Amino acid sequence: MGRAVLIFTPYEMKPYSSGIAILWGSDGLGVSSAYSDFDLRLSDREVNVNVTYAINVTTTLLIQGTYRVIQGDEKQVNVTCNLLNEGRPAVARDITLYYRSLNDWLIPGPPNNYTLVDYGNGTYLISFVAEIFSSDVEVSVHAYDQREIYTQANVTCVKL
């Protein structure tokens, strides 16, 4: 009778801790990643096999935003999101955008002021109109990819 042994070692170099790296910044970049090394050993009387490999699962969210003043404190905001799995375009399962108004984070609405366009290549454009009382327009995008990996990123939009 043979024996199979699987040993895994979570990656421990920065930015990983116990194989997990979560980098959710205010610079438009969000990364959620898991990385582990594996060693599989199979043995019986006639064969000994040793296979080592690593698995790195990484979801990256890149966002950038612009806005223009419509009238008074009312602003038209456009946010471009790029979602990646292991550096390649990914499909979002869910994307939620929040914007900062005074000290609160709000979801844009009503529905006729909000659009989300899926370009089919990991790129999404979110547009909305909202009353934002600051000259700094801050947004936060929270996304789940199809693997249900969550990541988020914040950015301050550029005035056009």
Image: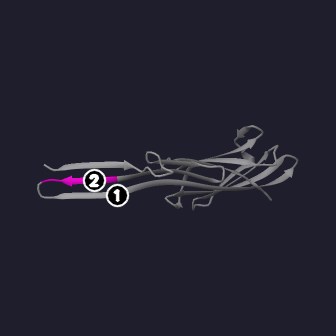
Task: Sort mark 2 into few (<14), some (14-19) or many (20+) by Cα contacts within 10 Å.
Answer: some
Q: Residue drawn at (71%, 55%), measured in percent from left and top?
A: 65
Query: Along the horizontal axis of the image, is 11 left or right of 69?
Result: left
- Could you say where residue 150 lies in the image, as x and y percent from the top left? 54, 46
On screen, 105 above or below 89?
A: above
Q: Quadrant of the C terminus?
A: bottom right
Q: Does the magenta stretch include residue 40?
A: yes
Q: Earlier in the sequence, mark 1 or mark 2?
A: 2
Query: Along the horizontal axis of the image, is 61 left or right of 20?
Result: right
User: Number of numbered discs present?
Assistant: 2
**Stretch of the chain drawn in magenta:** 38-44
Q: Is residue 31 magenta?
A: no
Q: What residue type is labelled 2?
A: Leu
User: To which quarter of the image does residue 118 belong?
Assistant: bottom right
| Pointer 1 with pointer 2, Cβ within 8 A | yes
Q: Residue drawn at (82%, 48%), measured in percent from left and top?
A: 135
Q: Outermost residue, right direction? A: 72
Task: Sort mark 1 into few (<14), some (14-19) or many (20+) by Cα contacts within 10 Å.
Answer: few
Q: Residue drawn at (24%, 53%), measured in percent from left and top?
A: 41
Q: Residue drawn at (74%, 47%), measured in percent from left and top?
A: 112
- Could you say where residue 7 lies in the image, as x and y percent from the top left? 30, 48
- Could you say where residue 110 lies in the image, as x and y percent from the top left? 74, 42
Q: Distance between the residues labelled 1 and 2?
A: 9 Å
Q: Name the residue under label 1.
A: 53
Q: Mark 2 points at which residue?
A: 40
- Could you say where residue 61 lies in the image, as x and y percent from the top left? 58, 54
Q: What residue type is labelled 1?
A: Tyr
Residue 69 visible at all:
yes
